Amino acid sequence: MNPNEIATKADINEILAAIAKLQSSININKVEQKFLRSADVRKMLNISDSTLQRLRISGALKSKKVNGTWFYKFEDIQNIMEVQHAKKNQ
């Protein structure tokens, strides 16, 4: 398309359709991982530092240490919260 040409409504609709297709493919391939620090996890689970450490050491809660800070997957924390909730309701 020449810069001096005028875009028609059909051209604009074609471009918008291509953008929508591109956005949907990006959203499908996008994997969003949310990580939490130890303090956030302790607050969410209402546990002490030593309890969090026990969960980490026992392997009940997966974690990664980056530059001296422990990080936990949000999804794993949700799973533990569901288990705690189920135990309370028994």
Image: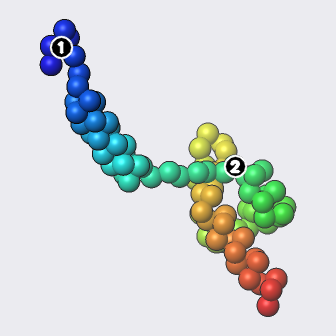
Q: Label 2, on which residue?
A: 37
Q: Label 1, on which residue?
A: 5
Identity, as a three-letter code, of the amino acid under mark 1: Glu
- Asked if residue 57 shows in the view, the reply is no
Q: Earlier in the sequence, mark 1 or mark 2?
A: 1
Q: What x and y, as percent, mark residue 31?
A: 45, 52
Q: What x and y, as percent, mark residue 49?
A: 81, 58
The outermost residue toward the left is 1
Residue at 22% x, 16% y is 6
Secondary element at tag 1: loop
- In what quadrant of the picture does the C terminus appear? bottom right
Query: Which of labels 1 and 2 is toward the front?
Result: 1
**Residues tagged 1 and 2 counted as in contact (Cβ below 8 A):** no
Left-right relation of 14 to 84: left
Viewer-closest of 11 and 67: 11
Q: What x and y, as percent, mark residue 4?
A: 19, 9
Q: What x and y, as percent, mark residue 18?
A: 27, 39
Secondary element at tag 2: strand
The outermost residue toward the front is 9
Viewer-closest of 28 and 4: 4
Viewer-closest of 61 and 20: 20
Viewer-closest of 61 and 73: 73
Residue at 22% x, 30% y is 11
Left-right relation of 16 to 68: left
